[in-house]
Amino acid sequence: MTLHRLGFIFLLYIAFSIAFLTLNARGNWDFVLSFRGTKLIGITMVAISISCATVLFQTISQNRILTPSIMGFDSLYILLQTMMVFFLGGFGFASLPQEIPFFLNFTIMMLASLALFGTLLGRSANQARQDLHRLLLTGIIFGVFFRSITSFIQRVIDPNDFVIAAASTFADFNTINTDLLLIASLMMIIALAALWHYRHELDVIALGKETATNLGIPYKTRLYTLLVIIALLISISTALVGPVAFFGLLVSNLAYQIIPSYHHAYLLPAASLIAASILIGGQVILEHLIGLSTPLSIVVECLGGLTFLLLIIRGTTR
Amino acid sequence: MIRLSSVSHQIDGAKILSNISANIPKGQVTALIGPNGAGKSTLLSLIARLQGLEQGSISIDDLDVVTTPSDELARKLAILTQSNSITARLRVRELVAFGRFPHHKGRPNHKDLERIEEAIEQFDLGDLADKFLDEVSGGQRQKAFVAMAYAQDTDYLLLDEPLNNLDMASARNLMRNLTELAAQTGKTIVIVLHEINYAALYANWIMVLKQGQLIANGPAKEILTPQIIADTFGIEVTIHEIDGKTLVMHYG
C-alpha cells in the first residue's frame, strides 16, 4: 500500500511537471522548455530541501509541529541578508558572487543550529520533555530577537539598500536564483546521499535518545550530523527562493497522513514529492488556469499556517 | 561479568551515586533493590551508556562502556528503561522488530524475522502483534518493550522496573520467563525490583543501594537478612523458608 501511494504521488508530480512545462506554451519550444525546465528543477530542489529538512527536524525533536523555520532559521537568514546589505551596501551586496552569501549563510546557520539545538536536543527522556518547551521558547525568542535586529538595521540603512534587503527576505517561487542552481544541486546531492545512507538509523532515532542509544546509534554524533544536513538544506531553499515558514509543516504532516509507515525510506521521498507537487501544481493552477497574480508563497504559507493551527488545536505534538 | 569500579555520578550538583565498586556475576539473575532515589536507575543507565560516565569505570566482559563503539555494545547489552515513551505510532510487532536493529542495521534477514516472532510468542503477544501501541494497555505495552529487549538477543539484559503496570499473573510469568531464560541460555539479567519477594524468589544475586551507596552485594540468601532490609528500607521484617523458597514478611 505504501509503495502504491508513493507511486501515485510520483505520477501526480510527473503530471504537474508536464503541465508546468507545456501549458500555454507558445513560440520557440527550445526556449520555453529550457526556461521552464530550469524553473521546474529549481522548484523541485526547493521542495525537496524544505520537506527533508522538516521531516529530519521533526524526527530528531520527536515532535511533529516543529519546523526549522518555526525555530527561527528563517529569521536568522533574513538577519544575515540584511546585515550583509548593511555592511557591504546595496551595490556591494548585489555585486557579490552568489556563492559567497550562500556559503556564509550555510556556515552561520550550521554553527547557530549546532550551538542552539545540539545542546538542547538529545537529553534523556525526562529532560527531553522539559527541553521541548525550552526548545520551542528558545526558538521563538531567538526568532523575535533576530527579527528585531533586522528591523532595526532596516531602519538605519539607506532607503535604496532597504529595497535590496527587503527583496531578499520574501519567498518568491517565480524568480528562482538560477545562478546558484549548479552549486546548490551539488550540495543537495551530498545532503540527500547522506540522508539516504542514514535512512534506517533515522527510523531508530525517531524513537528517542535512550532507545536509539540502546540500539547502537552513536546518538550525539548522529544528531550533530543531521543538524548540519538540516542547515545545508535550509540554506539551499532560502538561497534559491527565500525563507518559507510553514510550508514544511504542511508537507511533512501530509506525508505522515498519506504514508502509513514510520520508515524514512518512504517518508522522505513522499514528503519531497508532495511538496514538489503542491508547488508545481499550485504554480500551474495560479498562473495558467486561474490567471491570478497572487504569489504562490502566500497561498502555501496560508495553508501551512492553517495546518499549524489545526495541529495545535488537535493537540498533535507527535 | 559487569565490573563497576569507583563509579560516582552527580546530577546538577546532587550526588546520585558515590564510589560504587562491585561485580555483577555472569549468567545469573541479579536484582537491584533499594528505596526510591537510591540511584538504581542511574546505575543501570550508566552501565548501558545512556548517561555519560563522570567518574570511575564500567566494563562488560572486558568491553569498556565508554570506549566501545555503541553498535558493538548494542549486540552485547540491552536495556529497558522506565521511561519507555515512544512518540512514533508503531504496532507491537514493529516495536519488537526494532530490537533486531543492532544485528541487521535496517535489512532484516530470515533469522531476524524468526527471532522477532519468537520474542512475540515468548511474551504472549501474539494476539496483540498487529495492534498499535496506543491501542493496548499499559501492562501489554510494558510486555512489548520487554519483548523488544529480548529480541535484541544480547548476553546482558538490564531491566528497570519491568513489572510496572503488570498484573499479578503477568508479573509472575515475566519473572519466570526471565529466570528460565537466564538458566537456559546463560544470559545475565539485571532487574530493578521494588517487590522484595520477587527478588527473593527469582534472583540468584542481589545488589542493595541506598542514597547512592552500595549497602550490600552478594548471593540472594546472604543478602536477604532482617538487618540489611531494616538498614535499607527502615522497616522490620521476618524471613521465612517455605518449600525451600525465601519469603520476606512485614507487618503493619
Image: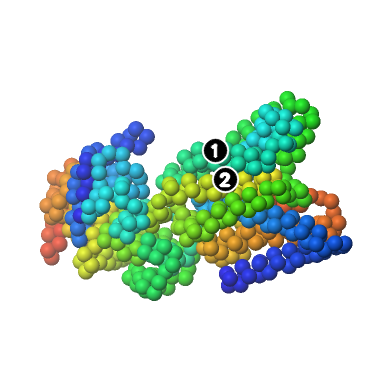
Specify whether disc 2 shares its chain with disc 1. yes
| A220 versus A138 height, above or below | below
Is B122 in front, or is A140?
A: A140
Q: Residue furthest right?
A: A27
Q: Residue at x 35, y 65 (%)?
A: B151
Q: How many marks?
A: 2
Residue in the image at 34% along x and 32% along y: B13
Residue picked out by circle 2: A231
Pick the front one: A122 or A20: A20
Q: Pointer 2 indicates a residue of which chain?
A: A
> Looking at the image, can residue A250 be seen?
no
Mark positioned earlier in the residue sequence (2 or 1): 1
Question: Mark 2 to mark 1: distance in Å?
Answer: 9 Å
Residue drawn at x 63%, y 56% as measured from the top left? A48
Q: Disc 1 residue type?
A: Ala
Number of the label disc, if any, that sits on residue B116: none
State the image coordinates of residue A166 (x, y, percent, origin top left): 75, 36
* Percent coordinates x, y for residue B123 in the rendering: 34, 68
Quadrant location of residue A170? top right
Q: Report the residue at 53% width, 63% height from top.
A: A265
Q: Secondary structure at mark 1?
A: helix
User: Circle 2 — which element?
Assistant: helix
Name the image quarter holding the C terminus of chain A: bottom right
Asked whether the residues under the numbered discs 2 and 1 touch, taking CB atoms below 8 Å apart as contact, a structural biologist would say: yes
User: Which amino acid does the dot numbered 2 rest on?
Assistant: Ala
Chain letter, disc 1 residue: A
